Image: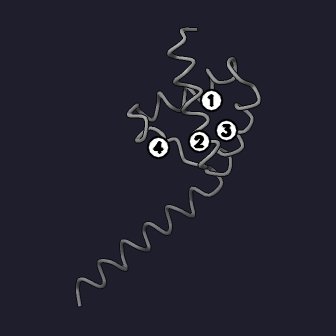
């Protein structure tokens, strides 16, 4: 693997592991697509650093388990905001 690719994958993975960020958040920070970041941390990272891979996998699992909660809260906030503007 190319050195710059290894550096990119490692940097993205460390960011996700340290902050608990979602793939979407990491993609915004590093200016790559969600697909690229996801492939980096779920496939390429395994061959680069297995310990970091396990840490990132744990964060991604947590984010997946909480996804429906974040979506529900976003919808709730949207309707509360709309209700406040209609008064």
Which one is earlier in the sequence, the residue at label 4 or at label 3?
Answer: 4
| Image side of residue 59 versus residue 22, left or right | right
Cβ–Cβ below 8 Å for labels 2 and 4? no
Q: Earlier in the sequence, mark 2 or mark 3?
A: 2
Report how far apart the C-alphas of labels 4 and 3 lie in the structure: 14 Å
| Helix, strand or loop for disc 1 | helix
Question: Is disc 1 in contact with disc 2, using a CB cutoff of under 8 Å?
Answer: no
Real-space CA distance between mark 3 and mark 1, rounded to the nearest whole angstrom: 8 Å
SS at badge 2: helix
Query: Which residue in the protein does label 4 denote?
Result: 24
Name the residue tied to disc 2: 16
Closer to the camera in the image, 57 or 67: 57
Q: Position of residue 35 (x, y in %)?
A: 47, 31
Question: Compared with residue 32, is residue 44 higher up or lower down, i.e. above or below?
Answer: above
Q: CA distance from mark 1 to mark 2?
A: 12 Å
Judging by the rendered image, the residue that carries numbered circle 3 is: 56
Q: x and y percent of residue 45 in the render?
A: 64, 24
First reached walking from the N terminus: tag 3 or tag 1: 1
Tell me if label 2 and label 3 are in contact, CB under 8 Å. Answer: yes
Q: Residues within 10 Å of mark 1 (few under 14, many from 20)?
A: some
Find numbered disc 3 in the image and state the secondary structure of the residue it sits on. helix
Position of the C terminus, as image quadrant, is: bottom left
The residue beneath circle 1 is 42
- Residue found at x 71% / y 23%: 49
Mark 4: few, some, or many residues within 10 Å (few <14, many ≥20)? some
């Amino acid at each position: 693997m190319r050195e710059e690719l290894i550096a990119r994958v490692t940097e993205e993975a460390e960011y996700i592991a340290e902050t608990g960020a979602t793939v979407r958040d990491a993609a915004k920070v590093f200016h790559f697509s969600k697909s690229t970041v996801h492939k980096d941390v779920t496939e390429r990272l395994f061959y680069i650093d297995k310990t970091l891979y396990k840490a990132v996998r744990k964060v991604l699992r947590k984010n997946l388990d909480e996804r429906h909660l974040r979506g529900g809260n976003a919808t709730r906030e949207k309707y509360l905001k709309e209700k406040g503007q209609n008064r």
